[in-house]
């Protein structure tokens, strides 16, 4: 685990930091290799305060020490498939923080059979489940957070190039991510008048727990590194830094975009 800025973690307020005094919710940390964890570290290093979530008791064993290291103000169970779970977590964030400045949606799910098969063989139940957890939960998150973001802020979700192009073995998740990126644009239009900005961050392939479910993922990593103009894949720290930037005032003139952080591989056919 990388060293975390001591001043940010211990609650010391350095107003020179870009996110000093800013508060937000970060979901989707499974372990210290998670993109969401890198995002949380980057935000805390810039002075932000965070609330973190865990999915179940099993994952809590791995994520609670990370939440403690980051000085998380809240550490709550969140299973978006359970009715009221998301809204309950956000209500607690309101009680602790008062207002919210940013939220990071880093959640996705697809049944293995649906992920590994042809898209036309996807079951209705499997498609509905993947869409609910991976896409619709972002809309629900925005709706629940809207009253707490009356001063504006940033909403960020995680996508992948499979939303735009066919990526072998990504299957129905490509369709789901395409819907998610479209949702970002429509959400940005709806929420723009309130100063709430919405983004999708699209990292290149990174070996995370979620990525391990994609068949032949190592081959995808190697191919991506060969294709990328920078000649490599990206790190979770680079994704974290980009996402943290989108929470700062430096990105105040931006909204509605899918932003690639993939060493440039998306520009190469």
Image: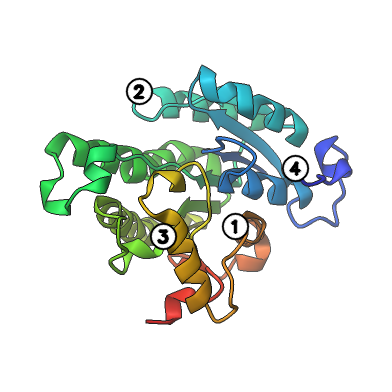
- In front of the other: 66 or 223: 223
Q: Contact, CB < 8 Å: mark 3 with mark 1? A: no
According to the picture, the residue beneath numbered tag 1 turns out to be 243
Judged by depth in the image, the label closer to the viewer, 4 or 3, is 4
Q: Is residue 20 above or below residue 222?
A: above
Question: What SS does tag 1 mark?
Answer: helix
Q: Is residue 214 above or below residue 269?
A: above
Residue 160: mark in rendering: 3
**CA–CA distance between discs 3 and 2?**
26 Å
Q: Residue at 35% of width from left, 60% of height from top?
A: 181
**CA–CA distance between discs 2 and 1?**
27 Å
- Asked whether the viewer can see residue 193, the reply is no
**CA–CA distance between discs 1 and 4?**
19 Å
Question: What SS does tag 3 mark?
Answer: loop
In percent of width and height, residue 95 lies at: 60, 25
Relative to 111, is 159 on the left or the right?
Answer: right
Q: Contact, CB < 8 Å: mark 4 with mark 3? A: no
Which image quarter: residue 165?
Answer: bottom left
According to the picture, the residue beneath numbered tag 4 turns out to be 1
In percent of width and height, residue 20 lies at: 78, 49
Which image quarter: residue 193?
Answer: bottom left
């Amino acid at each position: 685990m990388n060293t975390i800025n001591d001043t940010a973690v211990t609650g010391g307020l350095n107003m020179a930091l870009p996110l000093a005094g800013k508060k937000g919710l970060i979901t989707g940390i499974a372990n210290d290799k998670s993109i969401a964890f890198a995002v949380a570290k980057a935000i805390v290093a810039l002075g932000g305060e965070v609330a973190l979530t865990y999915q179940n008791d099993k994952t809590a064993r791995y994520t609670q020490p990370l939440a403690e290291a980051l000085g998380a103000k809240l550490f709550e169970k969140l299973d978006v498939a359970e009715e009221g779970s998301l809204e309950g977590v956000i209500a607690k964030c309101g009680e602790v923080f008062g207002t919210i400045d940013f939220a990071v949606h880093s959640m996705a799910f697809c049944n293995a059979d649906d992920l590994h098969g042809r898209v036309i063989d996807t079951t209705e139940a499997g498609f509905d489940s993947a869409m609910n957890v991976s896409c619709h939960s972002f809309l629900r998150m925005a709706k629940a957070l809207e009253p707490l973001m009356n001063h504006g802020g940033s909403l960020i979700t995680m996508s992948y190039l499979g939303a735009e192009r066919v990526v072998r073995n990504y299957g129905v998740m490509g369709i789901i991510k395409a819907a998610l990126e479209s949702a970002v644009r429509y959400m940005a239009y709806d929420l723009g008048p309130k100063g709430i900005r919405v983004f999708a961050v699209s990292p290149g392939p990174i070996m995370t727990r979620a990525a391990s479910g994609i068949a032949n993922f190592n081959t995808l990593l190697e191919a991506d590194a060969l294709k990328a103009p920078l000649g490599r894949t990206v790190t979770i720290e680079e994704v974290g830094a980009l996402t943290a930037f989108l929470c700062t005032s430096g990105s105040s003139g931006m909204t509605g975009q899918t932003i690639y952080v993939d060493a440039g591989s998306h520009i190469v056919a």
